[in-house]
Amino acid sequence: MNLFLQHFMFLPFSVLPPRKTHSMEVDSFEVSHNIRRWWMTPLHAVLIVLCAFGGKAIAQTRQFVITNNCAETVWVAGAGNPTPSFNGSSGGLELPAGATVTTSLPTPWVGGRFWGRRQCTFDANGKGSCQTGDCGGLQCQHAGAGNTSLAEFTLTGSATGADNYDISLVDGFDFPLSVQLNDPNPTHAVNAACQVDLRSSCPAGQQMRNSAGQVVGCKSLCSQYGTANYCCAGPYASPQACNNVKWDTNYRGAVLKQSCPSVYGYAFDDPSSDFNVVPLPASGYQITFCPANTLPNSGPATVPTFTITSQEPSQTVTPGGSVAYNLNVTASSTFTGTVKLSAAHLPGSCTWTTVGKVSCSNKGSSASFSASNVSLTPGVTVPVTLTVNTTTTPAPMLSTGNIEVIGQSSALENVWEGSLTVANPTAPDYVFSITPTSAQTVLPGTPVVYTVTATPVNGFTGVVSMSTSGLPATSTAPALPQFTFTGDPTPQSATITIATSASATKRAYFPLFTSFSANSLHDAQVALTVSSSAPSPDFTVSVTPAMSALQAGNGTSFTITTTPENGFSSTVALSAPSLPVGVTATFTPDSISGAATSSLTLATSASTSPGTYIIPVTATSGSLSHTTNISLTVNPAGVQFTDLDIGDPGTAGTFTANGGPFTVGGSGSDIFGTADQFNYAYQSATGDFTVITHVATQTDTDVWAKSGVMIRSTTADNAAFAAVFATPGHGVAMIVRTADGGGTTDLGQAQQNVPVWVKLQRSGNTFTGYASPDGLSWTLISTRDVGMTGSVTAGLAVTSKRESTLNISTFDSVIIR
């Protein structure tokens, strides 16, 4: 056995660079923020030094100079092994505004941290409390109350290797804070710094206030919600699994990272927030509360600096495909240097056991830059392309997650936050939903009942299990269902009763219901308040879809849903009291209880007058009565559409109506470029109007196959048009050709999949496109002027993007009004 391996086998584990964590109890699981992993330090260097010195680490000392640059007193605190001592006061000290204190610590130092406390009151024996960072006394014996800005350290015990540090706001924020090297050349490690006082931009629900109503700190999302998704625990306990809560646009991405890019915002923020120091600092570190805004990374306006931006904040990719982000790296007016780029939080491959244990890997995607080192001079912008490639085996997790681009130059760092959706509309999966979705308020000791539903798609088979987090104290643990699917597309539902305890703390909760099966995870989060006074039991009523169109003499169906609130459990009677002449309504059943549904059929006669009618549906229970409206368009009997293949596609299109859903089959190269090939079922139209349809099904002939609504100047293959299309791989896209004979422009996508509602409005020459999952809540895609005058055509357009294959699409409601 060689000497190197011998020392490795008998190496005391305590001398390996330790794993430093801070933890928060959330329900029955523990949330760990992994600030330091022993394998992150080059092990060979540690082993060689240990061999040279007989296996013993060299004793060293780091000096920490701690300065209070705030306009108020900071009660500084420290923890670790050993506990820091400040002027002889172990664990804590009052540090007036403008004061500095120095403490030295031997290495290795494990689990080291410093933090500040605000508005403290202590007696002569040092007993008392603080508004933030409280530990029960002046001299802290543990790591604090978990609602404070933390400077965290792991110090190596060898002459070589790396120290490690970060600033963490994973638990919360109270003071601006920075860490710098005390070294003649302090720029060989990134400064962790946050000079911005985040209390001024803290959302109302995250604010920590004192008895006078002053905002003394800001909770993190984990502290605010206390649920597994925001705390990266349970089924989310890996970097890949804990990336589905919009870290790029929620408080972490929109506020914290925009103001303080080099600090931790959640448990797996390591790539842009965890820093190694090689070589080691000459003497130690400078920690500053309320640092000056001239400090590198102290804030977004620090000069000199650089920025990373993109006009494409979100992209969608199918497993096996690739997608590009076009970035701009821009120097400030005084910055000169080279920026090294890297990408983080890429989609990974994950699996879950039936008890929710997650296992993930980085396999599934990779990233590359057109230039990973960018040389900048003052005021210069350099374009860079980031390409993300995904694999089919293993396939990355189907979800929308944060993607981060990190730029570093000496002590400077900046980041760009975006998102990437991995979608495969043909993959076997399931849709998970919960009712009621509205916020509930109950008295302590009152049960709340939720209904969860799993709906299989694309032949999904497997077992769907569940977990919960963020619940109030309960008298009995909720019984969680397990659904087994064998290929039958029928949804499965179950009720979950949250039996709140009579001693439950009166406050707002955000219960999280997480479902998982093999390589799929879906969740739903609701709001629940336990209060000393609760509103009376009630219910809501809704209808899906909210609109429909049919030809006179035919019928159409709707789903009526009642959702109980605040413990409502009575029977609800359904009726449609104001029907147009020639329209009848049938409810099956005509009364329902709790969270339930009824099928409503509206039937017309051949003599029903054409037009659009608003039909109220009334739900009544005792003195309670609620109404929801249906928009019903009755078209004249007989097919009113002309069907035509545009651009001579290779396979002839098809069109059927038969008084019910429309079925359109279209082939062709595409609806894009300077000429189109597709099938078009249309009517003539003039003036201002709207075209709406529900794309019920679509053949996946290509990720850019298109099925949707179009308004077109003529039926020439190069005519001007505006259209909103559902696609198998890119959500709902709005595409226009602004003039006859011109090129086309993709105006953007809404990340919604078939079945989906699409809408196109014309107002003069201005066209606006929308998408909706239910025909009620519409997402604006874009607006653009398109040159059209006089009579135009409007209807349904379908292309397969394949010359020899039809994209067969069904539209179960078509409205032109």
Image (cartoon, grey):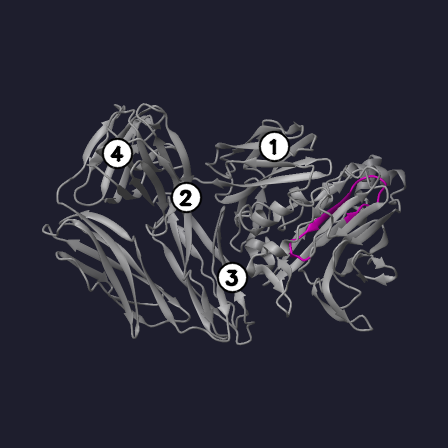
User: Alpha carbon of mark 1 to alpha carbon of mark 3: how far?
Assistant: 39 Å
Q: Secondary structure at mark 1?
A: strand
- Foreground: 195 or 776? 195
State how far apart marks 4 and 1 are (Cα).
Answer: 46 Å
- Identify the residue position indicated by label 4 in the image: 665
Question: In this picture, which residue range is highlighted in magenta?
Answer: 154-174
- Left or right of 390: which side holds 374? right
Q: Label 4 sits on what residue type?
A: Gly
Q: Provide residue 451's location: percent of width, then percent of height.
A: 40, 62
Q: Position of residue 327 (x, y in %)?
A: 56, 32
**Extreme residue in the left direction:** 607
Looking at this view, is 393 or 533 the one in front? 533
On screen, residue 171 above or below 640: below
**Mark 1 and mark 2: Cα distance apart in space:** 40 Å
Q: Tag 1: Cα neighbours inside 10 Å, few (<14), some, or many (≥20)?
A: many
Pinpoint residue 726: horizontal percent, then vertical percent.
Answer: 35, 39
Give the residue number, with chain letter if any, for mark 2. 428
Q: CA distance from mark 2 to mark 3?
A: 30 Å
Q: Which residue is mark 3?
A: 510
Whether 547 is drawn above or below 9: the answer is below
Query: At label 1, which amino acid type do we have?
Result: Val
The span from disc 2 to disc 4 (Cα, nearest Å) is: 24 Å
Instruction: Identify residue for label 1.
Output: 329
Residue 264: where, in percent of width, then height?
A: 65, 49
Q: Is residue 165 magenta?
A: yes
